[in-house]
């Protein structure tokens, strides 16, 4: 965790631009907000919010296994982020396969099984990871937006652009399978293909966000702003815009608090803000409904 | 040849025989109601017609096409309404977009709506009597209005055949009658054939040309008066069938197996049971 005093020293010079770690954190906040807004809304609509928690922990298992393969077996190039992505995608595909024609309960069971498998693999593998590489493993679990490198930001940017582009291109298809998968199949759409693609994009988005804010906080950041937006928005497009704006607000606010007021992990603070605002929004919405009735 | 032809159809669903040696032929245009208790294979029949399930044996032809070999061809020509439970009703989506779904899902990407498509949406909304609700959110409509919108979605591609899986579920008698009047009008004035599944012997049969009484096997198929005999109904629903007089004065048959939390009959029957009446 970067301390407040360090930040003060680095950014204290006259006319000095933002220190690189703050700039990377801001860029990552924007990127995470975009994936949380788009993939998060579709995860909530598709009823697979739990896939985010599952994929984030699958990422932990994947990253650990990639590290072991690299260090123990001499496989020359399998970066932890690639291992994380492969494991999360495997979970997404298993979820889609178990769900068949879109039965949410079955998908949740598949996610639970994969969640457990991935965590067990991670726990079993962690003992084999050399101690000097352990920080990379815990980086996936806890994450820290202030510790991102230039390479991390580059990977996040490319992955975010891919996710946003594909969700924009297949926006109608994803909307249709969320609304009525059986109806879409009956009208001749290749629903399984789009279901696998959507689940894979949600899993990829989760890994992207996990890299920046950690496996624990990512669940709050990808579901709470989306769920809050869906309480108020009149269309899916507006829900995505609102969820993105809320995510950005939470991340920037928490970064500001972390850098100026309290030395606290900004990702965790953003997660708390997201959850609190969702609960307040839900309470207000229900109270309004009761008054109307 | 009928619009739907089924010969010696046997379907296994997840290892259990759901339909056995079913044969029927539906002429064009007509309104056919498929009746039977829960688990009778009614939805399985519709899903086989649309090519979701491959039969173990038998012949199926829909509009002259074999859905086991060319399912996507059949699906592009037929309007389908799934069961209520398969539709996620809390999604913020406009009525217009729900109906456009019925057109655009049949096309390859990028599925862009044309001016003609929007005109078509207005046209079908007028048919179902909801023209003024195009810009409303789907989740803000009543259950009956939602069902009408979904029927409009099934109609928007001008299909010759509509397959409707429990379109009357969770609606009150008044809404059921309005939906059935709409379906009857589609058959009589627009030459659309309708095959509608329903699990209880309800007001639907009054509007139908044919009734198929199903309980894994086809127990009877023909005109409603010929099919709905006491012996056939006992074969389908068992001895627990009761007659019931609705508020509108219609005589209804209610099977003992039929228990739901929604319909007026069940609530009334429960009320009668609690009072100790038979």
Image (cartoon, rainbow, N blue to C red):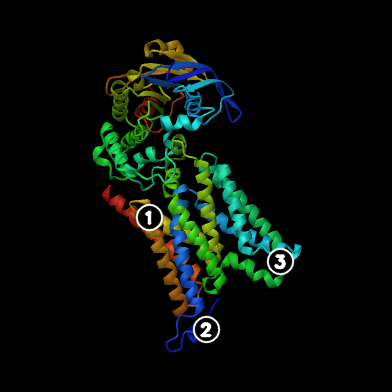
Q: Are marks 3 and 1 on the same chain?
A: yes
Labelled pair 3, 2 in contact (Cβ < 8 Å): no
**Residue occupying the far right of the picture:** A73
Q: Chain of mark 3?
A: A
- How far apart marks 3 and 1 lie (CA) works out to 42 Å
Q: CA distance from mark 1 to mark 2?
A: 38 Å
Left or right: B129 as drawn, with respect to B59: left
**Depth check, front residue: B207 or A89:** A89
Q: Tell which subunit mark 2 falls on.
A: A
Task: Please check whether the numbered discs 1 and 2 fall on a single chain.
Answer: yes
Q: What residue appears at the point 54 percent right and 52 percent down from the top-left corner?
A: A200
Q: List the residue tagged with mark 3.
A: A129
Are both tags, 3 and 2, on one chain?
yes
Res A273 visible:
yes
Disc number at residue A6? 2
Residue B230, percent across and down?
Answer: 42, 11
Cα–Cα gap, marks 3 and 2: 31 Å
**Tags 3 and 1 touching, CB below 8 Å:** no
From the image, tell me which residue sits under label 1.
Answer: A239
Q: Could you tell me which secondary element the residue under label 2 belongs to?
A: helix
**Residue A41, labelled with which disc?**
none
Helix, strand or loop at label 1? It is: helix
Image-quadrant location for residue A1: bottom right
């Amino acid at each position: 965790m970067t301390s407040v005093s360090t930040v003060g020293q680095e950014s204290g010079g006259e006319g000095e631009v933002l220190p690189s770690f703050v700039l990377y954190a801001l860029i990552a906040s924007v990127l995470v907000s975009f994936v949380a807004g788009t993939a998060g809304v579709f995860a909530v609509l598709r009823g697979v919010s739990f896939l985010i928690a599952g994929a984030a922990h699958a990422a932990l298992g994947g990253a650990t296994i990639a590290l072991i393969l690299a260090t123990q077996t001499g496989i020359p190039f399998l970066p932890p982020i690639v291992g994380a992505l492969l494991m999360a995608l495997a979970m997404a595909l298993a979820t889609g396969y178990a769900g068949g024609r879109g039965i949410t309960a079955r998908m949740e069971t598949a996610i639970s099984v994969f969640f457990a498998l991935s965590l067990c693999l991670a726990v079993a593998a962690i003992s084999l990871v050399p101690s000097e590489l352990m920080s990379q493993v815990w980086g996936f679990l806890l994450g820290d937006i202030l510790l991102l490198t230039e390479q991390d930001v580059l990977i996040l940017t490319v992955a975010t652009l891919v996710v946003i582009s594909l969700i924009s291109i297949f926006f109608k298809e994803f909307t249709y399978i969320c609304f009525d998968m059986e109806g879409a199949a009956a009208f001749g759409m290749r629903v399984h293909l789009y279901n696998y693609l959507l689940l894979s994009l949600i899993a990829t988005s989760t890994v992207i966000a996990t890299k920046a804010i950690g496996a624990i906080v990512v669940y709050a950041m990808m579901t709470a702003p989306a769920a809050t937006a869906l309480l108020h928005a009149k269309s899916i497009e507006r829900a995505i815009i609102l969820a993105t704006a809320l995510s950005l607000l939470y991340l920037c606010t928490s970064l500001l608090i972390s850098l100026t007021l309290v030395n606290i992990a900004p990702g965790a603070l953003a997660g708390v803000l997201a959850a609190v605002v969702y609960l307040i929004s839900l309470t207000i919405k229900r109270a309004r409904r009761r008054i109307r009735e | 040849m009928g619009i739907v032809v089924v010969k010696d159809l046997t379907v296994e669903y997840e290892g259990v025989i759901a339909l056995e040696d079913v044969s029927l032929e539906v002429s064009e245009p007509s309104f056919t109601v498929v009746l039977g208790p829960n688990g009778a294979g009614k939805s399985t029949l519709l899903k086989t017609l649309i090519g979701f399930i491959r039969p173990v044996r038998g012949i199926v032809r829909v509009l002259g096409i074999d859905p086991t070999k060319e399912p996507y061809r059949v699906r592009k020509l037929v309007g389908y309404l799934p069961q209520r439970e398969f539709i996620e009703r809390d999604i913020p989506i406009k009525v217009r977009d729900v109906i456009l779904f019925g057109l655009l899902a049949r096309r390859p990407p990028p599925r862009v709506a044309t001016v003609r498509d929007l005109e078509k949406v207005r046209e079908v909304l007028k048919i179902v009597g909801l023209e003024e609700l195009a810009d409303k959110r789907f989740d803000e409509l009543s259950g009956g209005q939602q069902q009408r919108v979904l029927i409009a979605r099934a109609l928007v591609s001008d299909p010759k055949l509509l397959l409707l899986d429990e379109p009357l579920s969770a609606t009150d008698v008044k809404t059921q009658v309005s939906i059935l009047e709409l379906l009857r009008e589609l058959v009589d004035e627009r030459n659309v054939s309708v095959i509608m599944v329903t699990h209880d012997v309800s007001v639907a049969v009054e509007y139908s040309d044919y009734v198929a009484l199903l309980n894994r096997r086809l127990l009877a198929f023909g005109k409603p008066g010929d099919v709905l005999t006491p012996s056939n109904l006992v074969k389908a629903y068992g001895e627990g069938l009761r007659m019931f007089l609705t508020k509108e004065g219609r005589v209804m048959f209610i099977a003992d197996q039929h228990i739901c939390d929604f319909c007026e009959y069940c609530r009334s029957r429960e009320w009668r049971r609690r009072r100790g009446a038979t």
